[in-house]
Amino acid sequence: METVALPLVAAFLGLVLGSFFNVVIHRLPKQESVVLPRSHCPRCLTPIHWYDNLPLLSYLFLGGRCRSCKAPISLRYPLVEALGALLLPYVVLRFGIGWDALRIFLFASTFLILFFTDLESRILPDELTLGGVLLAFGCSFFLDDPNWKGSLFGATLGFLILWGAYLFHLKWKKKEGLGWGDIKLILLIGALFGPFRMLWILITASLIGLIVGLGVIVLFKRGRDYELPFGSFLALASILFLFRFSWLEHFFSKWTNLAP
């Protein structure tokens, strides 16, 4: 019975947390408080009653539209809530209940939020990136991989690589090719994963960006200057490596001795 109850409770809590993630995704890029005021329709500003704010259910009952002004509700809301309901039970079942599971869930949630803020607003809030750097570096004092030296080296190396890419693109194209948010995000990734995994995450994110970029050009007829959310690709790659998927480790160990 416990085996069934635990993931169900985790899924419910994840659903509730997913609703909060949506608040953070919507408000943090606008420098708004994630606590007050209460949730409201972004179109008509009508406060949302509790019965219209039930994760997943309210979206279905309302047909994906605001009760007051009938404006469409972004599909991102039920998507993030559903991801939250999957994320927490997955972490609990995969890593158990303990400090390591809590650390993994916190950073996975952070990367999930960053994925959507960059996708929607092209903003990676400092509260999450730089705050995450401090948390990751603090955790490294209690870990072996990476330890605090590896965490510091990973953050420094990641910063130098993307800062160098930023300066090179600025000199070559006379405009920014990367935002400072991306550079702050790689600081977090380097501090959390250490230098080797940080490099593989950077390569993986670049490959994802290349595939998405080609798809955007071919399918949507966008020009090469279309701004892609590289921070979203970094966040997605980070989640994959955070969960230590065996197929990723097998893939990279096949091509190099520097397995993640």
Image (cartoon, rainbow, N blue to C red):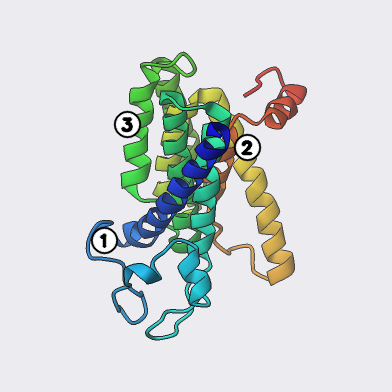
Q: Which residue is mark 1?
A: 32
Query: Circle 3 sits in a helix, a strand or a loop, which is it?
Result: helix
- What's the mark number on residue 203? 2
Quadrant in the picture for the N terminus: top right
Looking at the rendered structure, the secondary structure element under dot 2 is helix
Q: Amino acid at mark 2?
A: Ile
The mark nearer the N terminus, 1 or 2, is 1
Q: Earlier in the sequence, mark 3 or mark 2?
A: 3
Looking at the picture, which amino acid does disc 1 mark?
Glu
Label 3 to label 2: alpha-carbon separation: 24 Å
Q: Do the CB atoms of the residues marked 3 and 1 lie less than 8 Å apart? A: no
- For marks 3 and 2, give the one nearer the viewer: 3
Residue furthest toward the left?
36
Mark 1 or 2: in front is 1
How far apart, in angstroms, are the residues tagged by discs 3 and 1? 22 Å
Which quadrant: the C terminus? Answer: top right
Residue 51 in the image: state x and y as whole percent: 37, 70
Residue found 56% across the figure and 45% down from its top: 236
